[in-house]
């Protein structure tokens, strides 16, 4: 007669292994858990005089919501924030804050510069400084993604085409978000290809939050993938 105890123990072992697998899968699929490769992410945000203080607060909420969905850490996603108008201010460097809580606090303290719109200057600063190893960026590697997200509502007062191309040539994947009366031609000049995946438009800052999920999914992916979603104009829904 075959002993029943070993079979019973085997059954318990299988049940335990399945439970562990289920727990791992649940954690893997949990909201806010990135599965992408390490990323150096820099937000480049327009705070020129055309952006009202209340609108700038909405941009900051958008940044904080995107950050909340990232796996932030020295070996995961590092986040920087460049604030610009007529001048550029490096608000958060990639090496400064290594936790979500610290990043959110830093973003909350950012104040608008309220002058002109030198978007090209801001991209140049990001390329030369914000994405430098001195500011916490990792050395160029196929294992590390470099991503810039530009948020602007106006027409740049300087040239963006050449410097944006230089940034892309340096391996920086660039997303461009335009708000309201933004100049779409220059917005497209900033962004990486395909433009359908990298250019977004919203009619006002009050609905920019609708882009949060897109960027969380684009940056984090699902089950190890990083899908990009085209959202050309979400102002109507």
Image (tube, grey):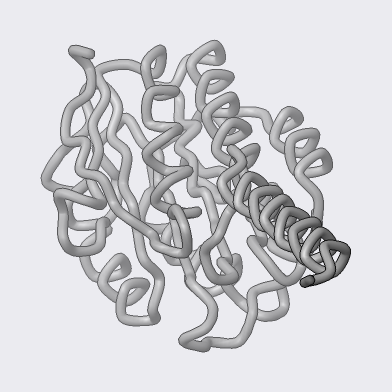
Q: Residue at x 60, y 87 (%)?
A: 139
Vertical relation: 83 (above or below) 96 = above
Q: Residue 30 occupies which quadrant of the picture?
A: top right
Vertical relation: 53 (above or below) 47 = above
Vertical relation: 200 (above or below) 221 = above
233 horizontally vs 123: left or right? left
Q: Residue at x 53, y 22 (%)?
A: 56
Give residue 106's position: percent from left, percent from top. 77, 38
226 horizontally vs 157: left or right? right
Is 146 or 112 nearer to us in this picture?
A: 146
Give residue 67's position: percent from left, percent from top. 62, 42
Viewer can see residue 83: yes
Is 88 or 192 nearer to us in this picture?
A: 192
User: Which quadrant is home to the C terminus?
Assistant: top left
126 horizontally vs 1: left or right? left
Residue furthest to the right in view is 5
Viewer can see residue 122: no
Q: Residue at x 52, y 49 (%)?
A: 43
Residue furthest to the left in view is 185
55 horizontally vs 153: left or right? right
Give residue 141's position: percent from left, percent from top. 52, 88
Q: Residue 161 occupies which quadrant of the picture?
A: bottom left
Q: Residue at x 22, y 23 (%)?
A: 234
Vertical relation: 223 (above or below) 217 = below
């Amino acid at each position: 007669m075959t002993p029943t105890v070993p079979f019973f123990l085997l059954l318990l072992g299988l049940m335990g292994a399945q439970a562990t697998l289920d727990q791992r899968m649940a954690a893997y699929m949990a909201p806010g858990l990135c599965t992408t490769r390490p990323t150096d992410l820099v937000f480049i945000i327009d705070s020129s005089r055309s952006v009202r203080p209340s609108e700038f607060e909405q941009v900051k909420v958008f940044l904080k919501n995107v950050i909340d969905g990232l796996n932030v850490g020295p070996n995961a996603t590092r986040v920087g924030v460049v604030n610009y108008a007529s001048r550029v201010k490096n608000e958060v460097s990639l090496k400064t804050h290594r936790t979500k809580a610290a990043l959110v606090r830093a973003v909350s303290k950012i104040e608008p510069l309220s002058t002109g719109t030198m978007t090209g200057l801001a991209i140049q600063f990001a390329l030369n400084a914000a994405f430098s190893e001195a500011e916490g960026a990792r050395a160029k590697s196929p294992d590390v993604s470099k991503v810039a997200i530009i948020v602007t509502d106006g027409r740049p007062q300087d040239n963006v085409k050449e410097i944006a191309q230089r940034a892309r040539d340096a391996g920086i994947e660039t997303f461009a978000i335009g708000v309201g009366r933004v100049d779409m031609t220059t917005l497209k000049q900033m962004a990486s290809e395909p433009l359908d995946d990298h250019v977004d438009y919203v009619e006002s800052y009050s609905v920019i939050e609708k882009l949060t999920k897109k960027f969380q999914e684009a940056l984090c992916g699902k089950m190890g993938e990083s899908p990009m979603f085209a959202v050309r104009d979400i102002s109507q829904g």
